Image (cartoon, grey):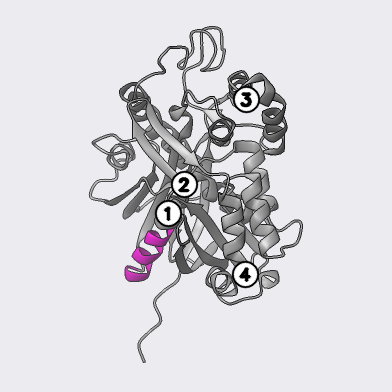
Amino acid sequence: MPAHPPCAFINAIGTAVPAHDIHDAFRGWAQARVASREAAVFERMARRAAITHRWSVLPSAPGGGSPVATGGFYDSDPLPGTADRMAVYAREAPALALDAIRALSASIDLGGITHLVVASCTGFVAPGIDQIIAADLKLEGVERLLIGFMGCYAAVAALRSARHIVRSEPAARVLVVTVELSTLHLQPAREIEPLLAMLQFGDGAAAALVTGEPHGLAIGTPFAATLDDSAALIRWDITDRGFAMHLSGEVPARIGAALTDPRFAARVTGGRDPRAIDAWAVHAGGRSILDAVAQALALDAAALDASRAVLADNGNMSSATLMFVLARLLAGPRVDAGVALAFGPGLAAEGFAFAGAH
């Protein structure tokens, strides 16, 4: 009989956010842009977003003001071009990623790294940030993989790739990094829907060590599915003024409808009763998305507490968000049966089963 492939484990996760909290400033900037008759509606919906903080790498205005204040990065007409935004990305994305790696190294030995998997969807630079990180860490000869522009479920692709590596090379030590600078892509919209979409996003980075050593969270069977006729619901358009995010208000309802389909739900849960799953790491894409998941699967009121806490403290950090949720679960009680789930362009749902190491 052939031997079973070894398991892969997320041994530890480190996270990092920039120093500047921009949520209230951006909220005020956005509210001032909507028509006066819509201001009350916008304010009510912004409060319902359940976000308290979002962090940005953007340089502050003189005197410590926000990027939208006088003298700030976005104090121009037209707004800064894509080249200026990518110059910030090239400088700040590797720096924030290295902050997350340092946080990881405070909890676990990072010696002997054999593979580096990096996911980032909010910028481009060449040599890539994977090469920049490897050079800074002096990871000579390390095998690298850069995952770009997959959106909010890119962390699933990164961790899934690490799982495949460890299962094929049991001695591998894979450093997985996600880093996103979503606040580089402010757009001059005046409509409520795109302004509320932009008010979801913040900057953040996370780093994980994935090995065959049996401690932490075991990464189980992955899954991937795409909702029919949904490609236009979430998308990024690369423009001369940054990446324009389109996040349709239909997304939560479409996700909820998909999860009420027993066949689709079975792919997500691995055929298990959702109530038998004791840990949910759901990408904190927004309060309405989390509500849709909880309602469709009839989850306990506290089932998505880790996701809601990340949303409140950080907003939606694209691919880094799921790693922040997993970090909270990793620091909590032992998990017997967990599911990681993220949504993104496509409209795609991707994830994997996980459990605490025995």
| Mark drawn on residue 10 | none
Q: Nearer the viewer, mark 2 or mark 4?
A: 2
Q: Quadrant of the C terminus?
A: bottom right
Residue 59 on the magenta segment: no
Contact? badges 2 and 1 (CB < 8 Å)? yes
Q: Which mark is residue 234?
A: 2
Amino acid carrying mark 4 in the image: Ala
Which residue does the image show at 38% across and 84% down from the upper left? 3
Q: Check if mark 2's residue and mark 4's residue have beta carbons within 8 Å.
A: no
Under mark 3, the amino acid is Arg
Residue at the image point whose x is 30% and y is 24% from the top: 83
Query: Which residue range is magenta in the image?
Result: 159-169
Q: Which of labels 1 and 3 is toward the front?
A: 1
Q: Residue 337, labelled with which disc? A: 4
Q: Nearer the viewer, residue 39 or 180?
A: 39
CA distance for labels 3 and 2: 22 Å
Along the polypeptide, which appears first: circle 2 or circle 4?
Answer: 2
C-alpha distance separating marks 4 and 3: 38 Å
| Residue type of the residue flagged with mark 2 | Ile
Is the residue under label 2 in contact with that under label 3 (CB below 8 Å)?
no
Q: Which mark is residue 346?
A: 1
Q: Which residue is mark 3?
A: 27
